[in-house]
Image: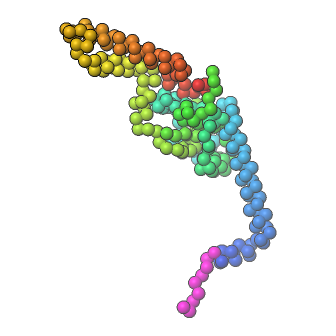
Amino acid sequence: MLFKRINIATKLAKVRDKSISEEELLASVYALLEKDNEREKRIQQSLSNNSREIINDFNFDLLETKNIFHINQIRETCIDYRLRFLNTSYFKGDIPLAAINKIKKLEELHDIEIQGYKIMAPSKLFRLEDKDDPLLFAPIGNDYFYLIHKWGKDLHPFRRILVWPFKNIINLALLVVLMSYAVSLMVPDGLFSKNNSAAEFWIIFFFMFKSIAAIVIFYGFALGKNFNPAIWRSKYL
C-alpha cells in the first residue's frame, strides 16, 4: 500500500503537545481530578446530613418541567404506594455514581451547591428511628421539589393494590368484611346444624369477622403498623 493509514490518536497527541507540555498537562489533569474529588466528597456529605428544609437557588429557565413535583403530588403517590419521603440521611442504600454525576452537572449548570436532598422509597430502604425504587429530589422552594435521579427496579405492578388496605381504616375494614364473607362461604353446609338457614350463615360470618379482625388488630399493634397517610413523611418505625 503506497499510503500509510493515519493514526488519529497520534495526530491528536501531536496537536496537544504543541499547545502544552507533558508536565503542565499532568498538573492540569491532577488539579481537575482533585477539584472533582473535593466536590464529590462535599456532595456525599450533603447527602448524609440530616439538614433542615433548604431552598436551592436554581435557574428555573434551565430546569426540566417534567422533573418538577409539588409536595401534594409526592404525598399522594407515597400514600397510594405506601412509600416514604425523607431526608437522604435516613437512606440506608447506596447513592449510585450516576446520581452523583447528575448532581455535579446540575451544580455546574446552575452555579450552586445543592443541599436538602430527599428520597422517596419504601420503608425498608430507610434507617428509621424507633419511636422494588428510590427517587432523589432537591427542594426548589414553595413546596416544589426537583427530581434529580431514579435508580433500582420499578415497583411491583400490583403494589398499589397490595397496599390499598393500609390507605385508611375504611379500606382495611372493607377487606376484613370481604375476607370474612369469603371464609364463611367455604364452611361446609350442615357443619354446625342439620338445618341450613340464613341465620346460621350470618352467625358464622359474625364469628369469622371477629376472628379475622382480631388477627388484623393484633398484627397491627404487634408490628407497630400504621396507615399510609401517617407514615409517608415519618422517620419513625
Relative to residue 201, is residue 225 depicted above or below?
below
Q: Quadrant of the C terminus?
A: top right
Side of 219 where 103 appears, left or right:
right
Query: Closer to the camera, 156 or 45?
Result: 156
| Badge count | 0
Q: Measuring from the top left, give residue 58's x and y in whole percent.
A: 63, 42
Main SS of the magenta segment? loop
Q: Measuring from the top left, give residue 216's x and y in whole percent.
A: 45, 18
Relative to residue 148, is residue 19 depicted above or below?
below
Query: Closer to the camera, 233 or 103?
Result: 233
Whether residue 151 is visible, yes or no, is: yes
Residue furthest bottom in the image: 2
Query: Closer to the camera, 139 or 164?
Result: 164
Whether residue 139 is visible, yes or no, is: no
Q: Residue at x 30, y 21 (%)?
A: 182
Q: Measuring from the top left, give residue 67's x and y in whole percent.
A: 53, 42
Side of 199 where 235 appears, left or right:
right
As for residue 2 lying within the magenta part, the answer is: yes
Q: Quadrant of the N terminus?
A: bottom right
- What's the magenta region? 1-9
Relative to residue 219, is residue 153 depicted above or below?
below
Side of 217 where 39 appears, left or right:
right
Q: Residue at x 49, y 16 (%)?
A: 218
Q: Name the colouring of the figure.
A: rainbow
The image quadrant that residue 59 belongs to is: top right
